[in-house]
Amino acid sequence: MDTPILVVMAAGMGSRYGGLKQIDPVGPSGQMILDYSVYDAYRAGFRRVVFIIKPELREAFESTIGARAARRMQVDYVYQLPDKLPAGLTAPEGRVKPLGTGHAVYCVHNVVDAPFAVINADDFYGADAFQQIFTYLSGIDRMDPVHRCCVIGYKVENTLTENGSVARGVCATDAEGRLTSIVERTKIYRDDRGVIRYEAEGKEPGGIIREGTPVSMNLWGFPAGYLDELEVMLRDFFANRLQQDPMKAELYLPSTVDWLTRAGRATAQVLTTDARWFGVTYREDKPTVVAAIADMTKAGAYPHEM
């Protein structure tokens, strides 16, 4: 059996936080949110983690999060660079904006050779989510002609913040729990009456999201063969969508899954969890995250030091 690998998208950490060393700690001993994700992944059975970073973050990353992760797991680093592309492709001249999460994951194609989970570096996912995705990935048949992907589906009410709106991928499933569509809603919030709503975008009207609706927090699981498909999808992206908006268009992971499922080349199982998401979307969110982790530490869910 191929032991699943954890892949962490962390190339954007420096730009969002003004440098890795300036990320505020949330744990009692200075732990960052990512430390808890790595810890939960290890407890679930992951034994190798690949961090996708920028070259300029390498030293700071290795001395902090990387050093702590290396106490438990094999640690590898991959750089997300605009020229890290399939042969024959070149990023548009003057392009500064990253090419998207689909491209970020493509960057691990030379170092990942087993089923793998993908997470954001700055979201707290919860132990149950990692256990579910590890179990699912461990059962993948490498010889299956259909790519058996999966995504953790959080109940929308467990992913909100009191300090503003959030962006989530709202999932729809069939009777077997397989993903049939995922729609990105960029402004989800709970109104004064306690109803969860999303705001209008463009010509589309706003609406209500029912409690219990599964939403994606970018915790995906893929078979190793998905990486070969990513090369095909990147070529299609460059030939079509990137031509329409060379400076801003991005290839997102949900789009790649949708592309493969529509082509009959993949399925995506939605693994539902009751876990609560935590993250610092707004500065005002930090006290809530710190308090929640302190409570979990006191309850014995996490060690005081990692």
Image (cartoon, rainbow, N blue to C red):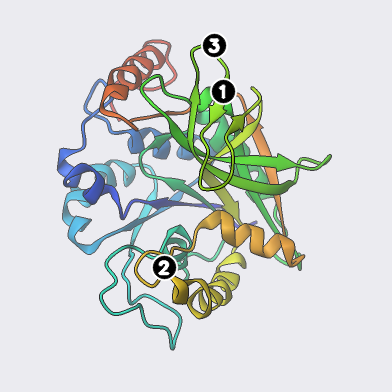
Q: Which residue is mark 3?
A: 193
Which secondary structure, mark 1? strand
Location of the N terminus by quadrant is: bottom right
- Pick whichever, 123 or 208, lies toward us: 208
Q: Give the quarter of the figure containing the C terminus.
A: top left
Mark count: 3
* Quarter where residue 67 is shown: top left
Q: Is residue 247 left or right of residue 204?
A: left
Would residue 151 appear left or right of 31 to someone viewing this image? right
- The amino acid type, in three-letter code, at marker 3 is Arg
The amino acid marked with disc number 1 is Ile
The picture places residue 129, in percent across and down from the top left corner, at: 56, 34
Q: Quadrant of residue 291?
A: top left
Count neighbours of disc 2 (C-alpha within 10 A) and say few if under 14, some if 14 to 19, many if 20 or more. many
Q: Is residue 202 visible to the viewer in this orientation of the structure?
A: yes
Where is mark 1, residue-wise? 196
In the visual, does 87 lie left or right of 17?
A: right
